[in-house]
Image (cartoon, helix red, strand yellow):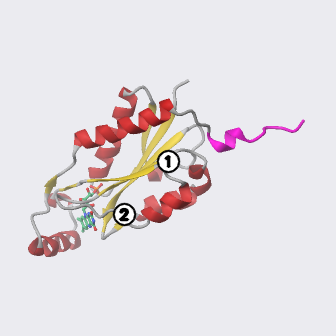
Amino acid sequence: MKVNVLVVYSSKHGGTQGIAERIGERLRNDGVAAAVRDVRDVNDLTGYDAVVLGSAVYMGSWRKDASDFAAHHRTELAARPVWLFSSGPLDEPALANPKPVLELVAQLGARGHQVFPGALHKAGLSLGEKLMVAAVARRSHNMTGDFRDWPQIDAWADGIAEALVKSPFQVRSRMAPTSGI
Ligand SMILES: Cc1cc2nc3c(=O)[nH]c(=O)nc-3n(C[C@H](O)[C@H](O)[C@H](O)COP(=O)(O)O)c2cc1C
């Protein structure tokens, strides 16, 4: 039976969603069953053997619904292989660990965290976001554009597929004795 992976994401303007969809596509090409869902559409992890959880980064932090998802499903996630990704930096050095990634890696025993360059198109931004982008851009560089690195994303997904196919694992809840009778 194929390993079944849930790729779940939180995206405000679609850039992170695109990364999640690419990861799902790549996993499927690698022979792993993968479903891609918005965090808001997932209530239950039953049936998934492993989870890839990603969020866009705003003001140094994951989006709240992604952090809430991790907190709400903490026990289920900790029982499975989990990988995390963040989509953020725009043509600049990555913030290594946006909040609350370090805590999540520890709590969930995540197998890895990857920061991917993101995308930003001014057209979709709120006025507040435009002002923030303008303030940052004044002191550094032009932040708009699509900096997503598809070969990097594919390579990361390949590593996940390889880890799942190569090293046998079981969801911990499934390993519990089913009955003493
Ligand atoms: C107002 C604003 C604040 C941002 N803050 C950060 C940040 O603190 N760190 C970071 O790496 N990227 C930051 N970004 C870049 C976004 O994370 C990037 O555009 C990301 O790809 C957006 O993902 P989404 O399209 O899925 O919402 C910011 C973007 C905006 C518009």
Q: In x, y percent, where is residue 132? A: 20, 73
Q: Quadrant of ligand 1?
A: bottom left
- Residue 160, horizontal then vertical, whole percent: 42, 39
Instruction: Specify whether 72 is left or right of 97.
Output: right
Closest to the observer: 42 or 174?
174
Label 1 crowding class (10 Å Cα cut-off): few <14, some 14-19, many 20+? many
Q: In the rendered structure, which disc, 2 or 1, sits on the residue that comes first in sequence?
A: 1
Q: Nearer the viewer, residue 109 or 33?
A: 109
82 vs 141, left or right, is right
Assign a secondary structure to mark 2. Answer: loop
Q: Is residue 24 visible?
A: no
Percent across and percent down for residue 42 are 51, 48
Q: Residue at x 23, y 41 (%)?
A: 150
Q: Quadrant of the N terminus?
A: top right
Q: Amino acid at mark 1?
A: Val
Residue 97's mark? 2
Please tell me whether mark 1 sits on a helix, a strand or a loop.
strand
Taking the magenta stretch, the answer to whether it contains residue 79 is no
Is 50 located above or below residue 71 in the figure?
above
Residue that lies at the very extreme toward the front in this rendered image? 167
Q: Relative to residue 164, is residue 18 drawn left or right?
A: left
Q: How many marks?
A: 2
Q: Main secondary structure of the magenta part?
A: loop
Label 1 sits on residue: 82
Is residue 83 something one can see in this rendering?
yes
Res 90 → quadrant? bottom left
- Residue 138 lies, in percent from the top left, at 9, 74
Quadrant hosting residue 65: bottom left
Residue shown at the point (22%, 67%) measured from the top left: 126
In the picture shown, does residue 73 fall above or below 100? above
Q: Amino acid under label 2?
A: Asn
The stretch drawn in magenta includes residue 177 = yes
